Image (cartoon, rainbow, N blue to C red):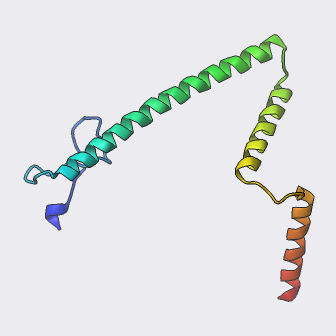
Amino acid sequence: DEANHFHPSSSSTSRGPFCPTPRTNEKQSDSDVDWRSAALDQRKQLEELSAKVAGLEERQQALCDLLLASGAISTERLMARTHRHRFRETLRKHPTKLGETLESVLQAKELALLLATRAG
């Protein structure tokens, strides 16, 4: 339907290709304006958060560089600590059954695969 078709904005505004502009002969409804306003607000918030994350990454890298250069911590210790932290966070987000170890999980999966293979 040609009347409901939108085309990407060809102007150099901050709208970008995902915020369509209605053709000039179409009348904008209040819901269209609200949708566009909300999308622009979200884009602005995303840009602000991206800038903050980039700033935090830069500071984190500078702090790691200082710790390593001062000899307060080795690269291996820093990497091990980071790995342990990520592992704890993963377990927190995806808890396992109590008492299960990696070995018991692998054994159970191997047994299931063996049974499935033998059963045909």
In the foreground, 72 or 34: 34
Coordinates of residue 59 in the picture (x, y in percent): 62, 20
In the rendered image, the residue lying farthest to the left is: 25
Q: Is residue 58 left or right of residue 112?
A: left
Q: Is residue 8 above or below residue 67?
A: below
Q: Is residue 37 left or right of residue 43?
A: left
Against 113, residue 33 (above or below) is: above
Place of residue 71 in the rendered image (x, y in percent of width and height, measured from the top left): 84, 14
Location of residue 7 with respect to 66 vertically, above or below = below
Residue at 25 percent of width and 46 percent of height: 34
Q: Is residue 79 left or right of residue 54?
A: right
Q: Residue at x 80, y 27 (%)?
A: 78
User: What quarter of the picture does the C terminus occupy?
Assistant: bottom right
Query: Residue 107 at what x, y percent from top left?
Result: 91, 66
Residue at 81% in and 32% down: 81
Looking at the rendering, which quadrant does residue 54 occupy? top right
Evaluate whether residue 31 shows in this view. Answer: yes
Residue sticking out furthest to the top = 70
Specify the quadrant that holds the N terminus.
bottom left
Total of numbered circles in the picture? 0
Q: Residue lying furthest front in this view? A: 98
Location of residue 86 by image quarter: top right
Residue 16 in sight in this render: no
Residue 36: image x %, image y %?
26, 45
Residue drawn where x is 88% and y is 85% of the image: 118
Question: Could you say which is closer to the camera, residue 12 or residue 32?
Answer: 32
